[in-house]
Amino acid sequence: MTIQAYQTLYESSIAYGMRKALQAEQGNAEKLIKIQNIEDECADLEEEVDLLKVKIANMLKEQEEEKGDGEQVHLEDVAFFTSENKKYMDELTKILTTFEEIKKDEDEDEN
């Protein structure tokens, strides 16, 4: 081979090496951009997770409050109906006692 052929081969290999180096550098830049995008997306998703955790905690708290309120209403209803039932029982007992006394008096009058 002649010196000219070696020089052409050398220049061609230099150009090939430069192209590959530029491609690698461009690939690295694209990968860095992709990494940054993924990190941003990850941060956004972590923020969304935190917001959802707060929302869940609030919902559970509201549910517990509603449950407590419901239990309180139930206890008040039970107390009310228990007292009403006692009133009716007392009234019924009074009526029955009065009825028994009247019947007893009638029986005594017949004898």
Image: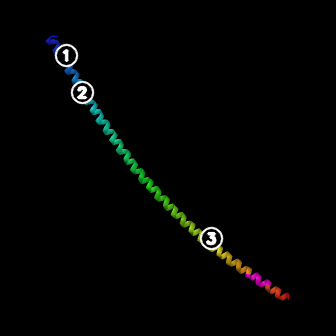
> Residue shown at 51%/64% (left/top)?
68
| Quarter occupied by residue 76 | bottom right
Mark 3 and mark 1: span between their CA atoms? 105 Å
Q: List the residue tagged with mark 1.
A: 9
> Residue shown at 19%/21% (left/top)?
14
- Asked whether the beta carbons under mark 3 and mark 1 sit within 8 Å of each other, the answer is no
Q: Which residues are magenta?
A: 97-103
Mark 2 and mark 3: span between their CA atoms? 87 Å
Camera-nearest residue between 2 and 96: 2
Callout 1, which amino acid? Leu
Position of 55 relative to 43 (above/below): below
Q: List the residue tagged with mark 2.
A: 22
Q: Quadrant of the N terminus?
A: top left
Q: List the residue tagged with mark 3.
A: 81
Q: Nearer the viewer, mark 2 or mark 3?
A: 2
Q: Nearer the viewer, mark 1 or mark 2?
A: 1
